Image: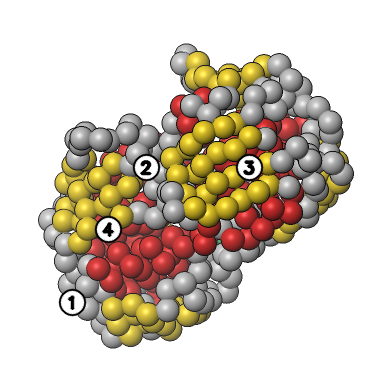
Amino acid sequence: MDKIRIVGGNELNGTISISGAKNAALPLMIASLLTDETLTLENVPRLRDVAQLTQILSNHGVDYSVDGKRAGDDSLKGQTLHLTAGEIVDTTAPYELVSKMRASFWVIGPLLARMHQAQVSLPGGCAIGTRPVDFFIDGLRALGADLDIDKGYIVGSCKGGLKGARVNFPKVSVGATHTVLMAATLAKGETVIENAAREPEVVDLANCLKGMGAIIEGAGTDTIHVQGVDRLHAYRHAVIPDRIETGTYAMAVAMTGGKVLLEGARADLLDSAIETLRGAGAEITQTPEGLLVARNGNGIKPVDISTEPFPGFPTDLQAQFMALMTKAQGTSRITENIFENRFMHVQELARLGAKIQLDGQVATIEGVSELHGAQVMATDLRASVSLVIAGLVAQGETTVSRVYHLDRGFERLEDKLSRCGAQIERISA
Ligand code: UD1
């Protein structure tokens, strides 16, 4: 298994191009199941999760192709994917495929909407909490689907198709919002989704669905109205830039010092993280090319955060921010409100010399003047990159193992960072 080797101590300076958002690309790819015409997606990141999802979709009968290299292309820029679900030949999403990535469970919405049946394995994904699927089941049942759980599968059908309804989620869920939104586009009549997720990825999905012919209002607010239509059609859509990748590199620069242009990044997608980073001492400016991030020589200030659904501080940046706070000049508190088991990076950061105390959902981080390189292990996708951020300033050598977690969500991280002066390399086993 590959490892990442880092020798800490270098500032970051230069340009990092921000990829298309993984968490937008995945539901957009799944939306291809809603039409027999071709959905073309530009700016799709080259990631393991994307490759995994193409396998799952092709098992349903989706044809896919990727544009070859074009003049002026940079290998770190996104790819253009064409997805055609001309005929869905299989409405089962099997355990072997779904267990590797939670988002693939979301195919249940489009399959029920278009084929009126689906058999989808209960999901897997990062082990960051219990991650149940009750909101999906209740939401799809409200739209008229009969759903049962049988031998680890959700088996669903809806004779005559889904029917619009009022769906009120008890708690904000990104995945359940994506799924019910997609399902509602082909349901008969109006669906109202209340307490909907307001994440930019939901807005991106809604924009693409609208381009495909869906009638949707209110995406980006907590109430989304969908008027069902008989069919959707071909469309070409560009995936929004990845706000989590943006925030991650911004935190890396805040950690190491230096000045980096995050090319293509959009500040409006991560206001709360930007405000937090400014509080910690980073200078962040939106330019026409992207976000310019720098840190003056004044060191890192401690800032308390609580993770919240959008527009609050994202749980997907919690581990990275904790890495930054390990070097702050004082004590900070991080409260994780979204997932109950999302502190597995704490013990790995401790191996690098971080001082962190855990009390339930709250971590108290006492900043230290030095971190020291060590062998550490990635435990989940975002946790793995927090170890890289810490390794960039740790004295000596840090080796991060199990980097397959990293490859699920960060496109060529070691290339992007080494182009900016970091001493970082992948060691292929
Ligand atoms: C998505 C993101 C993930 C991010 C998370 C929260 C993708 C591919 N993944 O995950 O990176 O960390 O949003 O921003 O976009 N819940 C239930 N029942 C359900 C569904 C969810 O109790 O049926 C709970 C979850 O356990 C969690 C909370 O709701 O506590 C939010 O989870 P959710 O927004 O659904 O996360 P994902 O969509 O899986």
Mark 3 burial class by Cα count in 10 Å: few <14, some 14-19, many 20+: many
- Helix, strand or loop under label 1: loop
Residue 114 occupies quadrant: bottom left
Residue at numbered disc 4: 237
Mark 4 burial class by Cα count in 10 Å: few <14, some 14-19, many 20+: some
Q: Name which residue type carries label 4.
A: His
* Percent x, y of residue 154: 39, 58
Q: Name which residue type carries label 2.
A: Pro
Mark 1 burial class by Cα count in 10 Å: few <14, some 14-19, many 20+: few
Residue 68 occupies quadrant: top left
- Helix, strand or loop under label 4: strand
* Percent x, y of residue 141: 40, 74
Between marks 4 and 3 in the image, the one whose residue lies nearer the viewer: 3
Is the Cβ of the residue at disc 1 closer than 8 Å to that at disc 4?
Answer: no
Residue at numbered disc 2: 45
* 174 displayed left or right of 364: left
Residue at numbered disc 1: 230
Residue at numbered disc 3: 294
Is the Cβ of the residue at disc 4 closer than 8 Å to that at disc 2?
Answer: no
For the residues marked 4 and 3, what is the alpha-carbon distance in whole angstroms?
32 Å
Q: Which mark is residue 242?
A: none
- Helix, strand or loop under label 3: strand
Q: Residue at x 43, y 65 (%)?
A: 202
Is the Cβ of the residue at disc 3 closer than 8 Å to that at disc 1?
Answer: no
N-terminal label among 2 and 1 = 2
Between marks 1 and 4 in the image, the one whose residue lies nearer the viewer: 4
For the residues marked 3 and 1, what is the alpha-carbon distance in whole angstroms?
51 Å
For the residues marked 3 and 2, what is the alpha-carbon distance in whole angstroms?
25 Å
Q: Name which residue type carries label 3.
A: Ala
- Helix, strand or loop under label 2: loop
